[in-house]
Image (tube, coloured by chain):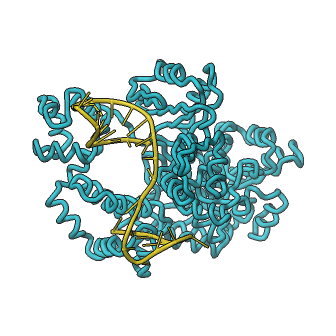
Amino acid sequence: MTNKELAEIFTLIADLMQIKGEVIYKILAYRKAAENLLSLPRAAKDIWEEGKLEEIPGVGKAIAEKIDEMLRTGKLNFLEKLAEEVPASLAGVLAVPDLGPKKVKLFWDQLGITSIDELKAAAQEDKLAGLPGMGKKSQDKILEGIEALSRRSGRLPLGDAWELAQEQLAFLRGLPNVSQVEAAGSLRRMRSTIGDIDILAASDDPEPVMEAFASQPEVARVEGRGSTKTSVEFNSGLRAQLWVHPIKKFGTALQYATGSKDHNVKLRELALSKGYSLSEHALTDKDGTELFCAGEQEVYQRLGIAWVPPELREDRGEVEAAKNGELPRLIEQGDILGDLHTHSTWSDGKATIREMAAEAVKRGYRVLAITDHSQSLGIANGLSIERLAQQKKEIALVQEEIGGRLLLLHGTEMEIKADGSLDYPDEVLAGLDIVIASLHVSIRQDRQQVTERVLNAIHNPHVDMIGHLTNRLIPEREGADLDMDKVLAAAAEMDTVLEINANPRRLDLEDIYARRAAAMGIKLAINTDAHRPEQLDLLQFGIGTARRGWVQKEDVINTWEPEKLVSWLQKRGAAV
DNA sequence: GCCGTTTTCGGCCCGACTGTTTTCAGTCG
């Protein structure tokens, strides 16, 4: 059983217990355990084999025993018993917006409803409106909620949400009496997928701002509208929330709207221990005196801890680190001196080597590696050994034209083939400046087989880097099912670089593995995999992912000056 | 059910919004 499967079980348990009406703190414990399993960079199964389950945060005796039972037997007696009391299908009904455990239980008790279809039929037959606490409006809202659920497209890749958010930010910044506008929520935290867009605006006259926001032609419906908050659904199905607060509250409001929820809970607990109550409006002391914070830094400062960069705010130890002055100095975009994974028209890129190089110079880069696809990837016009040799001449030519401003490296993004072999022989690899090996094909092989392929690539001394490790595509394709313990151990042993691919559809390494890799001393690279010049812009998403992984400048080789990079590559036997 | 630079027992964030209500419950983030 994977961490994800275990997490799903605990989430189901929490849902059913909540419908049953259990004390909320048990439920929160199960939810917390589920979340921590998802952000765990190791397989719980491996930790179980070491007998250390209770070292997982949020996992105590009771939950450890349940994990143990599931890993041993594949079943969970506790859940089976629970499902006899509360039908498991009720958890699906909870997914309907504005329906929580109380309402679900009410419909189940009173009308025997155990599925969304039954709920829809009951609402259409006007059977819900008469129930206690219900009315016509609530019944209609449930029907709308079921509709919305079917419209909803799930979480959006970061890059897509980013573009939409930028449009909204620009729109809001153009309104009168708006002094500041920031994206908040998971977008500001640079999560790989975004559920809805959260925006915070500062204004002393909120009403017209929210009116303008809600009246845009791309707004399909307004889901909620109060004095500080407006929620809308765009025509695309994406939802967005706008908060408007006076500028003097902007710091607390931004902190609140950025989340994550768990980070905020931690921060509010900390506030209580310091004699404050923290809300989006203010820090309130015991006398009821409100301290306003216009800036976010001030919120953290008054709590006596360092400001926590948004990318870290996931309750993964950042509040404790901030207390102890042990926050990492996260990598920044300005630290990056080059891109080590790009394509040209020699394979499936849309720009020539000359154009890519010119763009890199324009951005002030010192290094650019051209790493076109290798011969077996026919669909991407992969390079035969002969064409690879010809390409070397063109790279030399362009290098001569641009002179010393930019170091142009001749590399490859070489296939790790389905049978585990590599796509060029060693003597060809030895003639290149830099070698990336990547999985593209047969990624659904079983764990052992696909892991062996990657290990084989890592163990080849000519392979300098593994590109987009799992080859996942957000949102439609899960990555290869790799044994990360083995992969990371091998990369550490061979001093092989692991790429954080910055393309927002990839973001691969994932943040949690980037963090573990960096902690193990494994070198990382943040590359865009650009297929056209403007795609060098994607770097920001790779930086965001690296920062979510607590990655610092010294962990990343494309922060190196060209001389240092060349010397390291030469030590590995590269031709550069 | 978990957890501990005040605790191994007694805590476990805070407010907005909506709809049903004559003062609050449920849901959400």
The quadrant where residue B22 appears? top left
The quadrant where residue A238 appears? top left
Chain B shown in which color?
Answer: yellow
Q: Is residue A156 left or right of residue A466?
A: left
The quadrant where residue A219 appears? top left
Q: Is residue A464 above or below residue A339?
A: below
Residue found at the very far front of the displayed protein: A287
**Residue A235 place in picture, x, y as percent:** 42, 25
**Residue A200 place in picture, x, y as percent:** 56, 34
Q: Is residue A290 above or below residue A120?
A: below
Residue at the spot 62% in from the left edge and 71% down from the top edge:
A520
Looking at the rendering, in which quadrant would you find the C terminus of chain A?
bottom right
Nearer to me, A545 or A561: A545
Residue at the spot 69% in from the left edge and 38% down from the top edge:
A533
Residue at the spot 47% in from the left edge and 33% down from the top edge:
A241
Nearer to me, A259 or A568: A259
